[in-house]
Amino acid sequence: MVTTEERWRHLADDLGRRVDGVPAGRWDDPAPCEGWAARDVVRHLVEWMPALYFPAVDRPVPEIPSVDDDPAGAWRATDAAIRALLADPDLARRPTSTRAGDMPLEDLVAMTGLMDLLVHTWDLARATGQDETLDAEEAAAFLAGIEPWDAALRGSGHYGPRVAVPDDADAQTRLLAFTGRRP
């Protein structure tokens, strides 16, 4: 069985390749999320993830470079800090109590962070003209996990209206369309 730590590394590496591949002058290009630029995709991740995960295990939120000054550095610092949490078995298995419920940190990361890494990898790639291909197995697994929760997720305001795609579309296309993106 693949661990949350392994899944994080894989998905964060995919995002990191897109972050490092942003061409000069493209950080302010529009992203698929309404009102966001490419740097805002990174800003979103580096702001909410450390703010949730570190306090949940009684650790101080790490210092992260400014996304405005260094979006790639901000992502690398965030990724390294979260990898360190997940690599420590005591912290990874430490119970947390958040709005998401009571669970070990690694389960909290799996539930709240992994799909964000996957989908926002696509957002950044789309915004900056890079390879938009996502991990097909992860896309299929997330799609299967969220489809039964369509009404609740749609009501949360985190997703736009589902976009129609052909019935035979691949899992990546269906997942992105589920989240209101136009693949």
Image: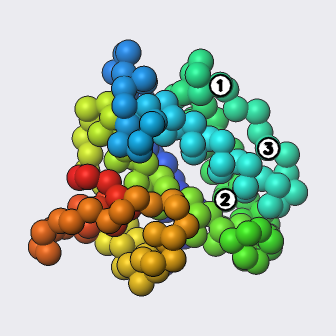
Expressed as whole percent of the image width and height from the top left, the position of residue 56 reads 80, 61
Say what amino acid the circle numbered 3 marks.
Answer: Val
Q: Where does label 1 land, which residue? A: 66
Residue at 45% across / 36% down in the picture?
35
The tag on residue 61 is 3
Residue 65 appears in the picture as rendered? yes
Question: Circle 2: is it few (<14), some (14-19), or many (20+) Cα within 10 Å?
Answer: many
Dot 3: within a 10 Å radius of its alpha carbon, few (fewer than 14), some, or many (20 or more) residues? Answer: some
In the figure, is residue 89 to the left or right of 3? right
Instruction: Give the alpha-carbon distance from disc 3 to disc 2, as whole Å.
Output: 15 Å
Element under disc 3: loop
- Residue under label 2: 86
Separation of residues labelled 1 and 2 (CA atoms): 24 Å
Q: Which of 26/152 is in front?
A: 152
The answer to whether residue 57 is left or right of residue 93 is right
Q: Earlier in the sequence, mark 1 or mark 3?
A: 3
Tell me the amino acid under the disc marked 2: Leu
